[in-house]
Each structure stands twice: as C-alpha cells, then as structure tokens.
Amino acid sequence: MLLNDYLRAAFGCKVYKISLSARVTCPNRDGTLGTGGCIFCSEGGSGEFAACAQLGISEQIAQAKARVVAKAGPDAKYIAYFQSYTNTYGDPKYLERIFREAMEPEEIVALSVGTRPDCLPEEILDMLERLSRIKPVWVELGLQTIHERSAKYIRRGYELPVYDDAVQKLHARGIHVITHLILGLPGESHEDMKKSLEHVVNVGSNGVKLQLLHVLKGTDLAEEYDAGKVPVMEFEEYIDLLCELVPLIPHEMVIHRLTGDGDKKLLIAPLWSADKKRVLNKVNQRVLPLVHFVD
C-alpha cells in the first residue's frame, strides 16, 4: 500500500510530512560509538529539509507549514517528523516535552520519530507509549541492510538482532515501525537487497522506505566515491531493481518511499536522481502497477 493511500484512509485527506529538529546528536557522532557518523550521513544528520533547528518547536512547525501551504491549503493535515540524527538519544523528559509540543496543534495528526534500534531504552519506550495514547506514533528505524559486511562498511554500529528486538518491543507497545533500507550499497547484489527487504517483511515492520544510495558532499562516502571505490546505480538499473523488490512487499505494509531526494546542493552522485520528474514518471509507469493495493 502506498503512503498517500494509507493516510487518506486513516485521516480522510491528503497529509503532509513536515521535518522538525529536536537538536539532538547520535552515538555514532558523540564518541559513544564513533565520531564520524555513518559513512553516508551528511553533516546535517540527513535532516537537510528540516526547519531551522534554532527555532522552538512551534516556530519550526509554522516555518515548515509555510513551505508547503501553497499546495497544501489552509486546512491541510500534517505529520510532525523528527528526522535528523537520533531522536530518541537524549534526556527522556526533554524529548517528551518537545514531542508533546509538536503533537499539540490540531492539524498535526501523527508523530514520526527517526532513530536507531540501539537507542530505545525502556524509559524511552515508556514515553513513546504514553504519546501513542494521544495521537499515532511512528518510529523510523535506520536498518539500511541486514548484511554484516555492509553494516560494518557503513559503520552502522549495531548487529541485526538489535533491530529485530527493537521491532518486537515497539510492536508490544502498539507503536508502528517504519524501516529504512538503502539500495545500492557497495558490494551488494540485487539478491542481497532482496534478502534485506524479505527480512524486514518477515519481522513485521509496518512500513518501509527504500532509499537509493546518495553520495553527498562532506561525507566519508564522498571520499570513497572520489577514490573510485563506490559505484552508483544507473537510472534504468534502479527502476529494474524496484520492479524486483516491490512485488515482495505485502499489501498491508505501507510503502513510504521508493526513491528519496538528496539535497541538490550536496548531491555528488547519482546526478540522475535530482531529476525528480523523470524519476517519478518512470516509477509511475513501471513500478506502481506492481504494488499490492488493498481491495
């Protein structure tokens, strides 16, 4: 099921995601696990499209809404999305306060929290469960791959059972899980990527984001790319891969993303991914007919 269809069924209208900043860091940056972050992660912690982090949450929401109001209209509904860095890595009281502030406006219909599976201690899980009694709460987990060699290469910093355990604990508390997978990691075959998706399906993730590997300026991946160590997918290969993967996704799993946008100011490769209209046209033509829609 496509995200837009799921949101219309759940909330009765088109719903827009707005990116907010919790002003947190990541154990892969503060020295707990490492200092450089994952090899592909930008300086902004993959939150380049978030509202200004120096603003309070209410001001961030207003700024983010202003960016989309022309197409969204005055009566639009929104998901408050905390995307950059690791948004359960911090003081639980502080996090609960800002999450509650983000959920308070009537037009905010759900909270989505991007994080790592190894940053979900019991007190954070308790807090997320409390919030889920107010409005729907989604937790987005950056798995990227199930293959240990790739996980080590990207410096993910945790093993696969940590992800499996996190999904189980979140489900036990009634919280939806969205899993991020990166397609095109160096050395991974189409079969490897299929196995990653199959694992995510089997573990019971409620949703999935399929993200093309982007090489962004200022990342360690960019240095690897410049050294000729990182091949990137060509356009038709990526579309062919999606045509292989999408039929594996059951209709009850929500497809949140099939491509992904890299910040054009930072994007090094693949440059074809910046032509969003071309990509979406091809996805609509070849990939969407393969989606398992709910009858």
Image (cartoon, helix red, strand yellow):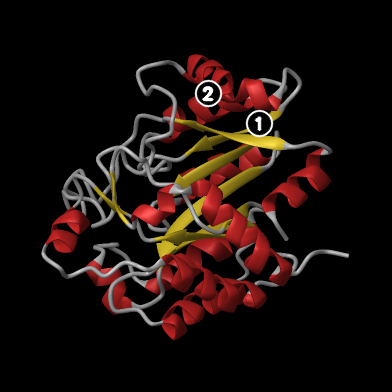
Q: Quadrant of residue 117?
A: bottom left
Q: Is residue 180 above or below residue 153?
A: above
Please give the residue where the numbered disc 1 appears in the rendered image. 78
Q: Is residue 141 above or below residue 201?
A: above
Q: Is residue 248 above or below residue 174?
A: below
Check residue 64 in the rendering and tell me which mark sits there, or answer none: 2
Q: Position of residue 59 (x, y in %)?
A: 49, 14
Q: Residue at x 59, y 74 (%)?
A: 243
How packed mark 2 is, by other alpha carbons closer than 10 Å (few <14, some 14-19, many 20 or more), is many
For the residue marked with disc 2, what is the amino acid?
A: Ala
- Using residue 96 as the reference point, say whether residue 74 is left or right of it: right
Answer with mark 1 or mark 2, whichever residue precedes in sequence.
2
Q: Position of residue 61 (x, y in %)?
A: 54, 21
Q: Position of residue 19 (x, y in %)?
A: 50, 33
Viewer-proximal residue among 38 and 291: 291
Q: Secondary structure at mark 2?
A: helix
Viewer-proximal residue among 252 and 124: 252
Which quadrant is home to the N terminus?
bottom right
Q: Residue at x 45, y 40 (%)?
A: 83
Residue 121 in view in this figure: yes
Viewer-proximal residue among 11 and 100: 11
| Mark 1 to mark 2 CA distance (whole Å) | 10 Å
Q: Quadrant of residue 190?
A: bottom left
